């Protein structure tokens, strides 16, 4: 129903109500051919303009007012509303003044007290990490979004062992591609053996180190690093944050990534199984070369049963469903790397 039609009915009803103060709704509907809904719409339009209001003693239940009375009431309502708005604005201005004079200085002091250092040279970062290794009491969290040279891992190993042996917890997340590299994987296994928790992720947002919820080290910019690069001559400048509030935010970032990352050995079960030393290594080499169990047995002087049992153990541990898949996984895990030490052994070569 259009507004024009409703206004026309409101005028018609207003004229009728002025002429007959004892009008009855049923009578009006019958005379004008309106429905109850149409009558209600006309009354609502009059009430919105202040020309009608409910009045129970009347036959119709309504009383109509002159335009002068309606306009006076509208002006009064407008004044009241304006005063309420002015009161609201005054209260807001008072609150703003209080915030500016009493609370903003507190916030400024808090920011001023938040210690932020910039470490430009690698030696500075190394000194800060050495200090953390000696003072850490609860935990160390880290992201490693790049593959470092083997020498860098060797240096970090001593710090990590010191932290873990002092009873602090260590959780670290590394790129999946980096963790597949033999020397990196050997380093991570050593960390796990010392008591650290290590997970992997396909991508990481940045390099990050958090110590005891009170110190965090992040790069001053997101470095464009090739994860397959063998070495990195320079390191980006780093920010050292000592504000608990800032560190808490970065810790939440870490926990989010940790929750969606994978356990280091969830897919492969860890290192080479069982004892048997070089003999198991030779079985792995020959298996990866595509030889059958019988051919492996002839080459090594082992029974077919021994070879089949050893191969079955290896395939079960790395979750391989075929010999080809087993060869691919063994290469990826670095099991064929001569420099990677055996971390476990088996008696599977004994008949």
Image (cartoon, grey):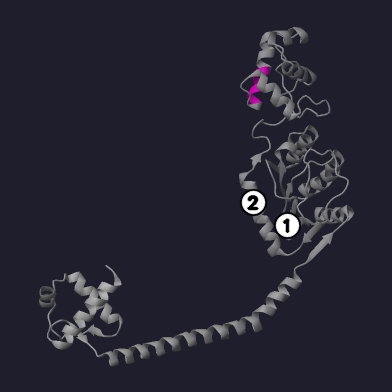
Q: Position of residue 271 (x, y in %)?
A: 72, 29
The first of marks 2 and 1 along the sequence is 1
Q: Residue at x 47, y 85 (%)?
A: 85
Q: Is residue 55 visible?
A: no
Q: Nearer the viewer, residue 48 or 309?
A: 48
- Magenta range is 311-317
What kind of element bears circle 1?
Answer: loop
Q: Quadrant of residue 25?
A: bottom left
Q: Position of residue 205 (x, y in %)?
A: 70, 49
Query: Tags 2 and 1 in contact by the CB under 8 Å rule?
Result: no
Q: Is residue 153 left or right of residue 94?
A: right
Q: Is residue 12 left or right of residue 214?
A: left
What kind of element bears circle 2?
Answer: helix
Q: Position of residue 295 (x, y in %)?
A: 72, 8
- Quadrant occupied by the C terminus: top right
Q: Nearer the viewer, residue 290 or 300?
A: 290
Q: Which residue is mark 1?
A: 212
């Amino acid at each position: 129903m259009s507004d024009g039609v409703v206004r026309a009915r409101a005028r018609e009803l207003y004229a009728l109500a002025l002429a007959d103060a004892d009008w009855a709704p049923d009578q009006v509907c019958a005379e004008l051919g309106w429905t109850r809904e149409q009558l209600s719409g006309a009354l609502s339009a009059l009430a919105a303009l202040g020309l009608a209001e409910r009045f129970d003693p009347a036959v119709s239940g309504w009383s109509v007012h002159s335009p002068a009375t309606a306009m006076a009431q509208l002006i009064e309502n407008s004044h009241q509303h304006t005063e309420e708005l002015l009161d609201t604005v005054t209260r807001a201005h008072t609150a703003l003044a209080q915030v500016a004079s009493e609370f903003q200085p507190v916030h400024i002091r808090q920011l001023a007290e938040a210690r932020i250092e910039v470490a430009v040279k690698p030696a500075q970062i190394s000194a800060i990490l050495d200090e953390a290794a000696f003072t850490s009491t609860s935990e160390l969290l880290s992201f490693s979004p790049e593959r470092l040279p083997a020498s860098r891992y060797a240096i970090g190993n001593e710090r990590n062992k010191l932290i873990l042996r002092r009873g602090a917890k260590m959780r670290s997340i590394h790129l999946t591609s980096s963790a597949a590299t033999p020397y990196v994987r050997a380093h991570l296994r050593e960390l796990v053996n010392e008591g650290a928790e290590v997970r992997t992720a396909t991508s990481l947002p940045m390099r990050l180190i958090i110590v005891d919820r009170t110190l965090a080290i992040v790069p001053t910019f997101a470095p464009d690093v090739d994860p397959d690069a063998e070495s990195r001559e320079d390191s980006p400048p780093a920010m050292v944050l000592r504000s608990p509030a800032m560190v808490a935010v970065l810790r939440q970032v870490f926990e989010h990534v940790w929750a969606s990352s994978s356990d280091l050995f969830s897919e492969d079960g860890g290192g080479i199984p069982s004892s048997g030393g070089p003999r198991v290594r030779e079985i792995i080499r020959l298996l990866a070369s595509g030889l059958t169990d019988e051919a492996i047995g002839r080459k090594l002087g082992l029974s077919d049963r021994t070879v089949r049992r050893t191969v079955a153990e290896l395939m079960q541990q790395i979750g391989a469903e075929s010999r080809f898949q087993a060869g691919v996984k063994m290469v990826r895990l670095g099991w064929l790397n001569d420099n990677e030490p055996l971390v476990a052994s088996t008696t599977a070569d004994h008949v």
